[in-house]
Amino acid sequence: MSLLSLFTTLALASIALTKPVSYPRVPCTPRSQTISWGPCSFPNLGSSPIECGILFVPVDYTSPALNETFGLPLFRSRATKPVTPSKGSILFNFGGPGYEAVQSLNSLADFLHLGVVNTLRFSCFDTPADRLIAAYKFPILAIGATDVALVDTWASTQVYSNICQTKNNNTNRGGVIGTAYVARDMMRIVDALNEDGLLRFWGFSYGSLLGETVAAMFPDRIDRLVLDGVVNGHNYYHRQGVDVDQLLSADDAFLGVLDQCITAGPAKCALATVNSTAADLAKALNRLAEEIRTAPIAVGDTVINFTFVKELLFIVIKYPSDVANAALHINNLLHRQNLTGVVDYYKSLQASIAMGDDDAIWGIKCSDTFPRSKELSEVMPDIEHMSNTSSTFGPYVASVTTICANWPFEAKERYAGDFKVKTRFPILFVGNTYDPATPVASARNMSASFEGSVVLEQHGFGHASLSQLSACTTTNLQAYFVNGTLPASGTVCEVDASLFK
């Protein structure tokens, strides 16, 4: 990895009404542009310098006669040990859709040598304050948060869609945001690099869905593709923009973290004093959520309620790098002590998570997806499926399936195929055993569609492989990017340390 020039694309590269068109297999426009690189306006956070550039790309690939373009911001981190001849550049997408890319590349560039900012925007509100007010007025509630939480959420998401339609009906944004558009932008970037015309890409979370799409659209231009923390693309495009299997490993992840806590003991994990088994500790924390569901607690400007508790637990197993500190605060919540500290910790977690650009995450997901539903009953099978796959987190997550059901916009171009594709070079899928958001089962599902691809399983916790360090995983990634060597089928990499060091 350190031998290669590294680039990052934006999580949202181009932004999108009309009826969708079928995907045409047409080549990219011949190379006609280059990228001008220069210093960035933001401070560098690591030892690897970040450079900024811009590339002009079409706003609407389906209507080239419009000749409308916009400047796509790009960020790159050069290789610390370049080689001759060059191995080429790697594009990155850190997830979303619509998550920022600047902070992610800035903070991860040093590690990577071992998203959306300042782009065409999609917004449903005039100001962030208006968006925040709407979130309070029309919340997405966890199922079971109240007796009418689901029907209230259904109505709230209808209102959200109405607001977005009113705001964007005359902007020509709703139809030109979507993953297929981003895939075409990626190939424009590849052309502008003036290398060999082939794509090298490492995509995390939604970035894996983007990688699946670009591979299906341009299979002959794929050189190296690592898809990490894998989204099931079949579900994404055809099940309300949501991978309804995303929680398949969530309960195992929850129990696994608690088991490591108990093994580590009270000196390293405060929750280890509560129960002697992971199963009993899980029951105690689920009881806590139920108790607070009927008796929420006001702390300063925050209400600790059912959703708060479930969200706190889910964030901890999705991003477990600070799990020992999290255990201390969860233990305080369990015993109703130092609740101000619990709230402050919860807010710090929220602030540290990469956030989307305006309303791009739903603008992209919902414009991508094919089904639309007029009645709540039509999405109930997906809601029930998600609820049943995780008893702990299903009710917290499943209500998101309502958001895209009434979405007013459809991307003009959407990938409508079955992913039954043979790429020029095989894809490497990577999945964590205990990933609560993108289970390794989804990696295997997608690998079954792409001929010759391989799944590398990292026997660790958290969302995508960067959640825990693994020399084994790093070695396999280096071998793939540098030499084109795929790991043997069934390879499982251990992580270097337990969660509670």
Image (cartoon, grey):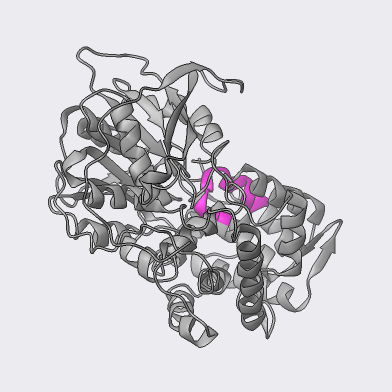
184 sits left or right of 146 in the view = left
Residue located 20% across and 26% down the image: 196
Q: Does the magenta run of residues contain 322?
A: yes
Question: Magenta segment range?
Answer: 315-328
* Residue sitting at x 57%, y 66%: 281
Say whether residue 121 is left or right of residue 78: right
Nearer to the camera, 205 or 493? 205
How many numbered marks, from 0 up?
0
Residue lying farthest to the right in this orientation: 300
Q: Nearer the viewer, residue 38 or 224?
A: 38
* Residue 412 lies in quadrant: bottom left
Q: Is residue 346 above or below residue 382?
A: above
The image shows residue 16, relative to residue 406, as above or below, that is above
Percent position of residue 159, x then y: 66, 72
Q: Is residue 12 left or right of residue 452?
A: right
User: Which residue: 21% across, 31% down?
Assistant: 479
- Residue 205 visible here: no
Q: Is residue 451 visible?
A: yes
Q: Is residue 151 above or below residue 135?
A: below
- Tell me: residue 34, above or below residue 245: above
Q: Residue at x 39, y 18 (%)?
A: 78
Q: Position of residue 131 (x, y in %)?
A: 71, 56
Residue 243 locus on image (x, y percent): 40, 65
- Residue 359: image quadrant is bottom right
